[in-house]
Amino acid sequence: MLKSSSPMSSREVMDGALFSPRKCSPDQAGQNRSVWVRAFIRMAAVHIREQRFGDAIRTLRKGLAKGRGGRDKVLMTLIGHCYYHKGDFVNASHAYTVVCALDPKSFEERKCLAQCYVRLDNDQRAIEECRKIPMRYYFRLGMADLFATLLERGSILYSEIPESILCEPQILIAQALQRFRSGKYGDALRLMSFVPPKQMDENDHYLMAVCHYGLKRYKSALALVNQMLQSRKNGKDISTKARCLNMKCAILYQIGNETEAKEVLQTFYESLNEPDPVTWHNVVLFHAPNQPQDAMQDWLQLAEELPYPSLSNLVLFCARSMEFDRAVDILQDNKSLWEHVPQELREVVEIILSTDSDPEVAGERLGEFAEELDKIHGDIQNEQHEIWQSADWRFSNGTAFAREEAVVQYLPILMSYAKLRWDDEEFETTEMLFEASAKYCLKNKIWRTNLAHVLFAQERYEASASLYKEIWDEAKKDGILSVQAIIPANLAVSYVMTNQNKRAEEIASSLELNLKQTEEGNGVRSESFILHSTFS
């Protein structure tokens, strides 16, 4: 939020005119200023125009040495600006401190001093300097950027921000970021709706897209992302384009259009000389099912640059392949990187890995998640009642979405625990686990797919056919060739076993299905117990 171009621009130094927040000139600084001071300022101006701030500082210090013993306000202000643009915020703060001591009413320089403290992560000192500036000057000095940065960091409360800048776009955006980080996407969008579109940049539009994505409003998110991609400015900026395309692929992935998502991302990936870590990770994610060993190797290489989700996906992929020992070894070798993965996900992964050695732990954790989901389920009813009574129903924070996030954590543990029962051929126990979780996961495709497998394994073909058909109908929207072969295969078998041969033939002919691809006997594959991979 804090602009790197402040407190000065080299374009403000032209033909000896002083650059400073006030843009004063030698004549404005006082007619009695000696000719040699103006000469040093003009020489420094040449260096500044050429971005040679070190030379400018040396020239200005020579002027100080011949002047008032380092107590010339204009020269010290220029030195502070040069240090600031060099990135030497310590020396810049020293220069601004001298200026403020020479003239306590140098409010613009005091703002610059506060900016230095922010750059040095000394927010408390920055706040102290801001409070020394009369509030009537806040709007003219453009203090909103500075307060917005402090608000984003949590160093200052919203109630502590002066009223004169309370409704400035920077403050509203900073508030929206706070709401976004706490998962209150609806509140974030409400605040962003008060920001004039002309005062938004690509980061602000992206924030809105991510909020819509978090609320499962994929059409709105996709519209914003496409708008950003069509912008000429964003089209030339590779980093912004990469961010937008990855978001677009995530949206397409979520709405079931995996083929298009893969094509878009692959085309962009191939156009890059050096792909960014997120794009590389997501390309690997698409190819992981067909090239598991290559995917794990790539994620391991990416782990240092992008611990989350590369390392977490690598470990989850090992768990999915039942390579628990390998997963544990990876965690042991990357302990410091593992700390960068969100705590909730770390807990889920560690529980999954413990199911092999201590199934009781997984069972207990399942119970804890079930209690949490029950509580959220109850909160949903209250929220829905409030939404219908509120004029702001469009911006609901969505307790239902909190449940979705809890299910994302709950589901891998359920799948791992159910896999243990499955391997022991305890199909009835496995079915009971699914029945107990039905009210949380009924709409989840992975959950329904695996429940269908469980019913199929017990030769309950009518029930399994019903579930498989729902999944098959949904999957066909993205092209039948992209559907896992196990689904139409088991559906066809279920139809055959329930004397619906015509339907079975239709499926086989539409897909050119080779029933030999499935395991002989019942066609159930253990890898159907899919663990979620994070799509960055």
Image (tube, rainbow, N blue to C red):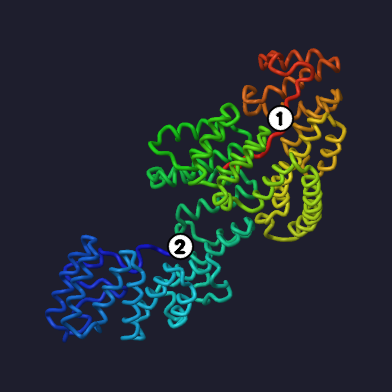
Helix, strand or loop for disc 1: helix
The residue under label 2 is which amino acid type? Met
The percent position of residue 314, horizontal first and vertical second, equals 59, 39
Q: CA distance from mark 2 to mark 1?
A: 46 Å
53 to the left or right of 500: left
Q: Is residue 1 above or below residue 270?
A: below
Residue 255 seen in render: no
Q: Residues within 10 Å of mark 1 (few under 14, many from 20)?
A: some
Instruction: Name the residue beneath numbered marker 2.
Output: 1
SS at mark 2 in the image: loop
> Does 253 sit left or right of 35 as displayed?
right
Q: Residue at x 56, y 30 (%)?
A: 293
Q: Quadrant of residue 517?
A: top right
Q: Are marks 2 and 1 in contact (CB under 8 Å)?
A: no
Tally of numbered tags: 2
Q: Amino acid at mark 1?
A: Ser
Residue at horizontal 71 percent and vertical 14 percent from the top: 515
Residue of label 1: 528
Q: Which residue: 59% across, 42% down? A: 330
Please identify the quadrant where the N terminus is shown: bottom left
